[in-house]
Amino acid sequence: MTKSLKDQTVLVTGAGRGLGAAIATAFAREGAQVVINYRKSKASAEALAHALGDRAIAVQADVLEAQAVASMIETATERMGPITTVVHNALADYSFNGDARHTLDRIPAADLVAQHATAVLGALNVFQATIPAMEAEGFGRIVTIGTNLFQNPVVPYHDYTSAKAALLALTRTSAAELGPKGITVNMVSGGLLRTTDASAGTPDAVFDLIADNTPLRSVTTPEEAADAVLFFASPWARAVTGQNLIVDGGLVYG
C-alpha cells in the first residue's frame, strides 16, 4: 500500500526550528498534514504552524517522556487523524563547534547519555506511540535523521556521532521487524548544514573548507536535506527500507 504525500499526516519531532522546521515546511508544501513537535521552542513552533496554515499544528512534548509523547499523539490524532509518517529529528542541545568539543580524554559520560537518550530512547518512545495506527492502516513511513560523521569522523563529536550510529542500528532493526506490516524505516544523514541554530557556532572557515571539498562546491542547506526526507515518505521509495542516505553534496561516500 502507498499514499501520496498529500494524503499523509506527518509528525516531525524537534520541528520548532532548524532542520526540523525545514522538513515540516517541505511536507506542508506538498500538501501533507503536519504535526510540529517541539520541546522548548514554543514561539517559533507556533509561528511555523501559523505560517503553514490550517493543515499544521504545533504540539509540545519532550520525546524523552513516554507519557508526554503518548499525549501528543492523542492530541494530534484528535485534530488531524492517525499519524501515518514520522520523522525523528529531535536533537539534545548541541553546538557544532569543533574548537569547543570535548576530546575523548575529558568528555563526561553524561554527555553521551544525553545524546543517546534523545536520539535512541526518544525514537523508541515515538515509534511505540505511532506504530499501532500505522499497523492498523497497513501503511507507515518512518525517517530518522543521522549524520555523515560516522562514515567520516573528521571532528570527534563522540557523544553526538555515537548516538546517531546507534540510531542507525535501531533504524535497521526496526525496518526488519516492521516491513511485513507495510511500514518502511530509513535514515537521512546530512553533513554540517548551513545554517541552523546548532551549526551557528561553526566558524565560516569550516563552512568554506567543506564547500571546497564537496563536488557541488556548496554546503548543504536544511531545505536540501528536507527534500531527501520527502523521498523516503513518497511512493517512489515504496520498496526502500533499512537504508541510510547521505545528503551532503557528495562529500562522503559509502
Image: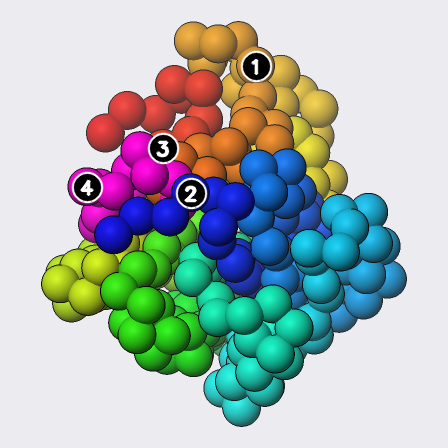
Label 3 sits on residue: 246
Label 4 packing within 10 angstroms: few (<14), some (14-19), many (20+): few
Q: Nearer the viewer, mark 1 or mark 4?
A: 4
Between 159 and 28, the residue placed more toward the observer is: 28
Going from the N terminus, do you reach mark 4 or mark 3 first?
Answer: 4
The residue segment tinted magenta is 233-244
Q: Which residue is mark 1?
A: 218
Residue in the picture at 47% in, 43% down: 5
- Quarter of the image where one finds residue 152: top left
- Residue depth check, mark 1 versus mark 2: number of the one nearer the observer: 2
Three-letter amino acid code at the position of disc 2: Ser
Asked which secondary structure carries label 3, the reply is: strand
> Which amino acid lies under the numbered mark 1 shown in the image of this protein?
Ser
Give coordinates of residue 167: x percent, y percent. Answer: 34, 60
Residue 241 forms part of the magenta stretch: yes
State the SS at label 2.
loop
Q: Earlier in the sequence, mark 1 or mark 2?
A: 2
Dot 3 amino acid type: Ile
